[in-house]
Amino acid sequence: MPGPRERVVLDTTLIGTLVERLKALRDVLWRHARVIAALVAPLGRPGDPAAELRRAAAWADDAQRMLTRRLALVRASDEARDAATPDGRLAVVGTGGGTASGGRVALTLPPDPFGGDGDAARAAGTLLGVELAGAALRVSPDVATIAGAAARLGVGANDPDLVAGFVDAVGPDRLAAVLRLVGGVRGGGYVIEATARGPRVHASHGGPHTLVDAPSRRLPAETAAALTAALGAALATFSRAGRLTAGWLARFNAHGEAGAAETTLLGPLLGHGRYAPATLRLLGDALFAGTDVGGDHYRVRPAPLAGPGTGGDARDVGLFGGGPPAARATYAAALLRAIASEPALVARFATDHVEEILAGSRLAALPPPVQTGVPEQVASAWACLARRAGGPEARRADPAGAATFVARLGFAVHQYRAAHLDQTRRWDTSWLLPAGLRAAIGEVLGVWREEMYASVTGLLPAADALRDASGGALVTAWPAAASSDTAADTSGPWSTRLTGPIDGARIPAELWADLLGEALAAGGPLARALATDAALVAGRWEQDQWAATRGYRGDGRTAYPASPRALGRLRQSALFAFFGATLARTADQLTLRAELDAREDTRDTAKVIDELAAIVRAIKPADPVGTLTGLAVSVPVAGAAADLKPFGAPILSSDALAAIDSARIAVAALPGWQAAYVASATAVWLRRADDPIIPVEVTDAAGRRRRFTGDPRADGFITGPLDDFLDAAGRPLAPERTSPARRAAYLRWLASPALVANNDRLPILVSVLPQPAD
């Protein structure tokens, strides 16, 4: 038995794997024991030949239960430590500090009152559950007993055995009645009946008036808060143990009925613990299935609660009797934020519901006097969900899922714009996205800025899975094969099966443009941050290009048709061309809406256009550093000047519109420049017999002197059959016929110094925008 406190150093990942192996061993041994017993029984032989197998299975079961309990306690302490300090590395648990790195945890556990005995903990939990149910489900609740039970439950809420005993003793139906008491939820059409085995709850069925709504059935606020926190933490442990399933939830209602879950009662609990992703996914899917945002009003309704153990007819009823609308909104917001806090879950969940998120957000942003009924906390939770689904934590935990979310978010925005906005016909029937969701989109673009600009300046077509058979236009519906429910969880959404953040660079430029346009329409600091991102990426590209091609004028005598840095300049020009064109199109759309809608928010639109014009004036494609300086000064000044304009009918600034128009002309990219470059580079290779490729020697970023000849094999771009992108005649294969490895090798070869420097058609392409000096 451990002392007062115990120092623990273990690898939670390995222990989790060991637990699963022990469970598998237990199941195999039990299965073989049953088979042997069935085979031997007809023979009438004395003894029990399967006894040893059953004893071994019992040992494996005891071992996995002990380790599961141990692991749950360690993880709970580790999470509490991480929550106590920003980095989770210097926290003190008990009398010692702990250090976590990946799956390895070192910490000091608080004392275990049961000395590792899971059966004793379960028995204590059973007694605690009986005590709480008896004290709460009375005509006049025993407040002192309830407070004491809440305190003891709070102490042991991380113990999976104690919690299992407690929850099993209370039962899902009586727990729902307890939560109604705790939350002060009146009505519901249920009665509490005293029986020899304790209080029982069931539907009133039109019988005598129930006493559950009597004024005496109220808990003091302090007691209710303590019990809420304890029950929330306990149910989180119950969930992480895999027990809070659809089958359990199907009995979670104060009517004692099978197939109905009063999920709204969970709202106050969700913020008091970390629930299992499987539980959150189950509840979240039911929430969206019961949320109607397809019309002009926000509505909620009962929805199917799918999952094993439900019999196929379980429903999420919210609350029997309806209950206060604010309670359902509180539950929805708490659930969505709990999902958003799970990096391994949020991206794929949000991907499956992105259309509903966008539709509901647009509904919430409709101006007065329209009353859509969208609760503000729900709209805010939708924005939080989108922000976290494409954020850095989701990208690290589920890179393919995060890339898929960004792609589907862009696809949904693009499809909506195509259906509701036609700039050439001056037609706009769209509903705007709220500022909160636009800010979330802007933050997502900040995380994926490298992939966005790699996509729009990429030499090969992006996202063949999202284009129609012609390869030009986008498909009109999200491909079924690109769903987040694909069989291979590690694969990305595209037919080329690239994985993770690489997929972000395969998202079509049209989708990136629509996402960037929505974010730029917010104006202010967000638009300035997006412009800063563009300048930072361009500056880094320039620096990387220089570092990889130093000293290419080695002998001072060789003259190349172009600089080996020319392609980098071309991509830098295309980056600013994309940003400028998107900004100009956004300004056009804002101007059109200001002309079509004579509303009070037109003044805000005029301010945004002034800020976009200030961004245009600050951008210097040949000087990324100067661009950053200009953005830091000019945009805040433009916003402040707009705020100082006299009140009255807002007038769009002609100077601002003129600045944007001039930028539109200046940054007009040469159509099809990528295909033109690929064709010219291919011609350099195919004509090498008549026009030999002049080798280029450079010092690369690692400081090594390298000689590039233009031959993909000699230069190391083709190392074997897996990355060989040339056909039998030595011609590059069509990109759509290449594997990811061949495609990557092909792209590196196209950008190699020898192929770029020997391309005599590059000066024409590079003249798209003014270029920085060499």
Image (cartoon, rainbow, N blue to C red):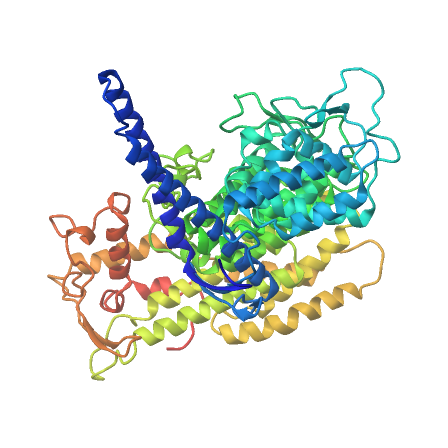
Residue 31 visible at all: yes
Where 638 falls versus 477 (above or below)?
below
Q: Quadrant of the C terminus?
A: bottom left
Question: Residue 391: x percent and y percent?
Answer: 52, 55
Q: 759 or 268, which lies in front?
A: 268
Q: Residue at x 54, y 39 (%)?
A: 279
Question: Residue 345: x percent and y percent?
Answer: 50, 45
Q: Quadrant of residue 176 in the image?
A: top right
Q: How many marks?
A: 0
Q: 137 or 295, which lies in front?
A: 137
Q: Residue at x 24, y 21 (%)?
A: 39
Q: Residue furthest right?
A: 215
Q: Residue furthest front?
A: 46
Q: Is residue 670 left or right of residue 365?
A: left
Residue 517 visible at all: no
Q: Residue at x 31, y 57 (%)?
A: 677
Where 769 falls versus 743 (above or below)?
below
Q: 52 or 86, which lies in front?
A: 52
Question: Residue 489: x percent and y percent?
Answer: 38, 43
Where 109 falls versus 722 (above or below)?
below
Q: Is residue 631 left or right of residue 394?
A: right
Question: Residue 405: x percent and y percent?
Answer: 49, 45
Q: Is residue 341 left or right of residue 137?
A: left
